[in-house]
Amino acid sequence: MSLTPQWLDELRSRITLSTLIGRTVKVTRAGREYKACCPFHNEKTPSFTINDEKGFYHCFGCSAHGDAIRWMTDQRGLSFMDAVKELAAEAGMDVPAPDPRAAKKAEEAASLRDVVQAAADWFTQQLGSSNGAPAREYLAKRGISEATRKAFGFGLAPESRSALKEALKKFPTAMLVESGMLIAVEDKEPYDRFRGRLMIPIRDARGRVIAFGGRILGDGEPKYLNSPDTPLFDKGRTLYNLDKASPASRQTNRIIVVEGYMDVIALAEAGIADAVAPLGTALTENQLGMIWRMVPVPVLCFDGDSAGQKAAMRAAMRALPLLRPGFSLSFATLPGGQDPDDIVRARGAAGFAEILESAQPLVERLWAHEVAAGPLATPEERAALKSRLLAHADAIQDADVRHHYREAFRERLDTLFARKQPERAQRQPWTPNPPRGGFGGGRRFGPDPRLQPPADETRSIGQAGISAPYIAALIGGLLRYPEALRRNEEALTRLPVSDSGDAELLGIMLDSAMCREGLDCEGLLAILEPMKVYNRATTLLRADGMHFSFNRRLESSDEAAAAHETALRDLDEYIGVLVTQPEIRERLAQATADFQRTMDDEGLARQQKLRAMDEDLTRRLAALSENSSQ
């Protein structure tokens, strides 16, 4: 059995290395990488790093180094083929069947990189020649400097059906066709695919040329032409400029997604290096995954015309099922008919940055899109709006994110369609027997048995905060698992903490986590030690009698590794419940008071719905405690 380098590269790209290693080793995020105590030698201070973007791990202590396959052979003790088969099953790939001709084919496929690199060099040479004067003039008009031209490897494909074929005649014709450089048609001699075009190399994440994009010079269609899919190039799994944008994003903590490679290049000319673009397709699930590995909330900045905005909505729809806590999209809207090049030419990098700063969160973009989709004058039209919004929320697979989207849409709908109550000169007390013609069509009735007025604690929970044992369990868990602080920052800042000492401790923990990535328990305690909150922190850390997985003291490193992901997952859910339940109870108290005043069916339905949500959150809290004790 022979496995081609391309097949193995595809296998590695489909495996998230930190997830694979994290199944048996406790890993902690440290900036754009992950760290852990090396499993190949004994150490107390982590020196083992994992880089998902580059697909390798490295230990600075013992020099252990490798990729996903090497991890399976060295750490798991599998043979090479067993490791490949197990990873392929996980990645959903079929291992090639044994073929005596595979070795020859692999050798030819490996040479495709030589073909496209030779083509890139020849295109660059042509741009610099006398034939390239019109193309160089076009670049100058676009404001693209010579430095940018060289950085992005611009070239020229002459207006000829055979110039490239002749220039690369040292390569077999079949290989030129397979690399996408030539077009083969039945009963005709293969001819150059790119003719009379400004050529832009497309590179993989390692900076290797794998394909090309060509812009026509003069009139003609199509305006832009990309290489076809080849053994080197899969447009749905490639982002233009990823090799340059990935390191740039580490400085800006931002990734901008624009429509095409000329947009990327225009932004780079203006000094904005952290932009990528899909290649003639809507953003795919694989491309979203690549972007999210760099930043949790990338900014989509498509053209301001209708086509650009439709592309933005297609990306939003594609992202919905993949959303998870902390990971989403935001949308920067350009003025109508303008693209990023227009903006940076007219307003410079600062003007473009202003547009990015006003980007809408995904939930706001969905709301604005659906509200603008049609009239909302009739009950049927309003019901249709609600149905569309809730359908978007229901597309989200993560239960917590789905719940919050449904709540966000319901709150906006309530505000948009709020029924104005007639003003009363004096509030009348409720009586169990209202006059005929009132609520219930004139029937006589007492208090509705389904209506349960809120308890005193419910009425005041927004002011009084959450009970001390729950807050103690939370802070104890965050001390053990400080990585949860960064990814739950927004939720934790909304949490009502009644005890001033615990509120101060939680605030300091949040500030510390925001300032230092990859903070672990020991590092957090070291920061707290000189402060007056340190004694409270150590008390909460020792209090492991609380029945949650994230409050347990673990006896062995094996137990810790196995329990780490469970504890983090439970802690995230626990935070969600603690933040959401007081808000739900405040709304429940208000809904109950409203119903007591109006006594209508709509008010009753709203009160019951909120009560059901409150009970569901209580059940989830109990389930977390039960699961941790099993």
Image (tube, rainbow, N blue to C red):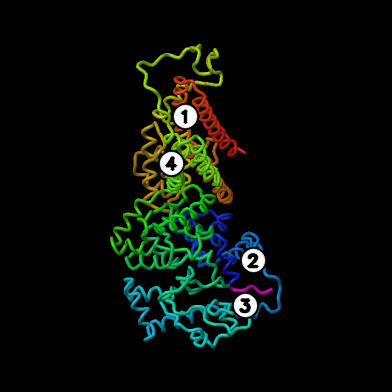
Mark 4 or mark 2, which is nearer the start of the sequence? Answer: 2
Residue 559 in picture, x, y percent from top left: 58, 48
- Please name which of the two marks, 2 or 3, marks the residue nearer to the observer: 3
Residue 109, quarter of the rendered image: bottom right
Looking at the picture, which amino acid does disc 2 mark?
Val
> Which dot marks residue 491?
4
Residue at the disc numbered 3: 106
Question: Which one is earlier in the sequence, the residue at label 1 or at label 2?
Answer: 2
Q: Amino acid at mark 1?
A: Arg
Q: Nearer the viewer, mark 1 or mark 4?
A: 1
* SS for callout 3: helix
Residue range in magenta is 1-5
**Residue corresponding to mark 2:** 84
Circles 1 and 4: CB atoms closer than 8 Å: no
Vertical relation: 486 (above or below) 210:
above
Q: CA distance from mark 1 to mark 4?
A: 17 Å
Number of the label disc, if any, that sits on residue 585: 1
Question: Neighbour class for label 2 at 10 Å: few (<14), some, many (≥20)?
Answer: many
Q: Marks 3 and 4, Cα distance to the nearest angstrom?
A: 52 Å
* Sequence-first tag of 1 and 4: 4
